[in-house]
Image (spheres, rainbow, N blue to C red):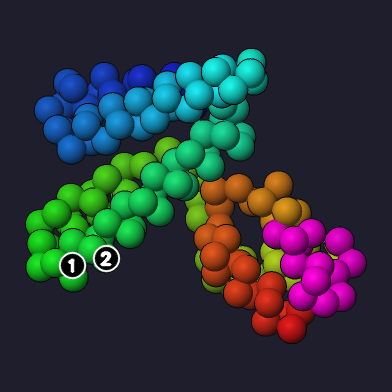
Amino acid sequence: MRASLTEAMKDAMKSGDKRRLSTIRLMNAAIKDKDINSRTDGHDSALTPDTGLVELFAKMVKQRQESIAVYEQGGRPELAQQEREEIAVIQSFMPKQMTDDEAKAAVAEAIKSVGAASVKDMGKVMAELKAKYAGQMDFAKAGAVVKALLG
């Protein structure tokens, strides 16, 4: 994934796509920052493409979605549009997002696999979902579905 980011950055430089270039640079900076923090915390493991990078990118998308809401409330549609463009670039490096129906089916399957019987088992279900579907679903929405099915 890191190699594809580097290639995408080169392509953006050649094509003169400034928004894509700046977003990819932000992604690379976030990756390096996370790598440095993990080393200073005593962990030798760098971010893995399967979990760490996808989670990092999902966090970046969520931050931008929150910024969009703030910009729209503040009457700054041009800044909100900029954030939307950045989200599109970040999501192009992430696995395909699940639809609501796919997410509901995944939640039902996770509930069945961990044997959850009540809302008290929600943590087990969410851990199972995060292990299997990191970066592919919105866990805030998934949490609401888990509560609805178990409650």
Judge from the rendering whether residue 102 lies leftward or rightward of residue 65; answer left or right: right
| First to last magenta residue range | 114-126
Query: Can residue 112 be seen at all in this image of the molecule?
Result: yes
SS of the residue under disc 2? helix
Above/below status of 134 relative to 40: below
Q: Nearer the viewer, residue 81 or 29?
A: 29
SS of the residue under disc 1? helix
Find disc 1 in the rendering and name its residue: 72
Q: Residue 9's x, y, as percent?
A: 28, 24
Give the quadrant of the C terminus: bottom right
Q: What amino acid is labelled 1 in the image?
A: Glu
Q: Residue 140's x, y, as percent?
A: 54, 65
Judge from the rendering whether residue 107 lies leftward or rightward of residue 1; answer left or right: right
Q: Are there few (<14), some (14-19), or many (20+) residues within 10 Å of tag 1?
A: some
Quarter of the image for residue 66 reads: bottom left
Which residue is located at x 54 percent, y 48 percent?
135
Q: Badges 1 and 2: C-beta atoms under 8 Å apart?
A: yes
Q: CA distance from mark 1 to mark 2?
A: 5 Å
Q: Residue 34's x, y, as percent?
A: 48, 27
Find disc 2 in the rendering and name its residue: 69
Judge from the rendering whether residue 51 lies leftward or rightward of residue 112; answer left or right: left
Which residue is located at x 74 percent, y 61 percent?
123
Q: Are there few (<14), some (14-19), or many (20+) residues within 10 Å of tag 2?
A: few
